[in-house]
Image (spheres, rainbow, N blue to C red):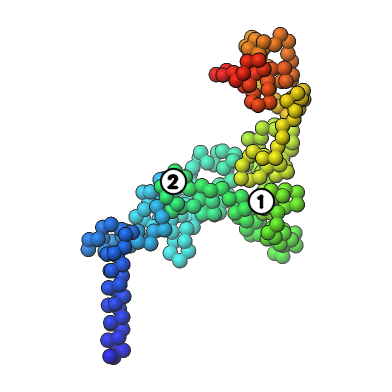
Amino acid sequence: MTLKKALLFAVLTFVLLVLAFFVFSSRHPDKTAHAALSPASWQHMVLPGALSQPHAFLADNCAACHTPNKGVEAQNCIVCHADNKTVLQRQPSAFHAEISECAACHLEHQGRIPSTTKMDHVALAHIGLKQAQKSATAHDPQLAALVAWMKQTDSSPHAPQLQRAESQLNCATCHSTKDRHRGLFGNDCASCHATTKWTLPDFRHPSSTSQSCAQCHQAPPSHYMMHFKMVSMMTARVAKAEVNQCFLCHQTTSWNDIKGVGFYKHH
């Protein structure tokens, strides 16, 4: 067999194998000749998973998000999402205006889920570090030391529940509007909180007989109005009480668990 015939045989074999793969594959139910020549059909053959519900309309257009030989680029996302005022005007998500990577936290092909967001604080820290490296002077010793420190795998000394990269983030930049401590504990959220959830498994509330509630808990606005005497005190059956004497009416199980009354539905 000559070389030319061997190459022709190899090409024909390859074509037959590809067509057989298309016919017998379960990735695409349409087995017509038209489908075999459709780019969208072949895209579905290599689809790693269904797109999320908001992006479902792009299922036949991989090029809308993917750049050949590069993958998903932020510029492809920005084409549609650059003018998302809802995201940009909210303090927790305003950082999207300067972010240069999207795929680190927004994962696709996970199925018909309502959202692609999976917040990754480590990825956010590394993105910030990349931006700092671009703006820093060459061979900046402080930046080099920070990079080396962040690459270590153990936790941060002052925040053992965080990875080193996460400990470089300023929590208050995004989360100060969610601060239930009203600034009393400062901005070092990582001294108590982790990035996985707000609750603290190791937290133990002071004794139920404690009378120092006002050190941590601020009364609602209604307690500074006539509503306090006309409704709150009457419901709790307390003749005299100051706004900062929470312990006279409330129990530590819940704010609406009133002594001698039980759980009070006030709205």
The circle drawn on residue 113 is 2
Under circle 1, the secondary element is helix
Q: Is residue 239 visible?
A: yes
Q: Quadrant of residue 188?
A: top right
Badge 1: few (under 14), some or many (20 or more) residues near its Cα, within 10 Å? Answer: many
Residue at 68% across, 46% down: 170
- Picture layout, residue 3 above or below residue 89: below
Front-lying residue, 62 or 246:
246
Coordinates of residue 153 in the picture (x, y in percent): 68, 59
The residue closer to the viewer here, 39 or 135, is 39
Horizontal side, residue 216 vs residue 72: left or right: right
Q: Secondary structure at mark 2?
A: loop
Above or below — where is 186 with respect to 246? below
Is 125 rendered above or below residue 231? below
Count of number-bearing discs: 2
Left or right, 43 with reference to 212: left
Say which label, 2 or 1, has the lower sequence index: 2
Left or right, residue 227 beside residue 247: left
Query: Quadrant where the C terminus lies?
Result: top right
Q: Is residue 131 visible?
A: no
**Residue 166 has which mark?**
1
Q: Position of residue 143 (x, y in %)?
A: 71, 59
Observer-nearest of 249 and 81: 249
Outermost residue on the left side: it is 33
The crowd level at tag 2 (other Cα within 10 Å; few <14, some 14-19, many 20+) is some
Label 2, label 1: how many angstroms apart (C-alpha)?
Answer: 27 Å
The residue type indicated by label 1 comes to: Glu
| Residue that appears at 36% across and 56% down | 61
Expressed as whole percent of the image width and height from the top left, the position of residue 134 reads 64, 59
Three-letter amino acid code of the residue under disc 2: Ile
Locate residue 171: give its quadrant. top right
| Residue 267 numbered mark, or none | none
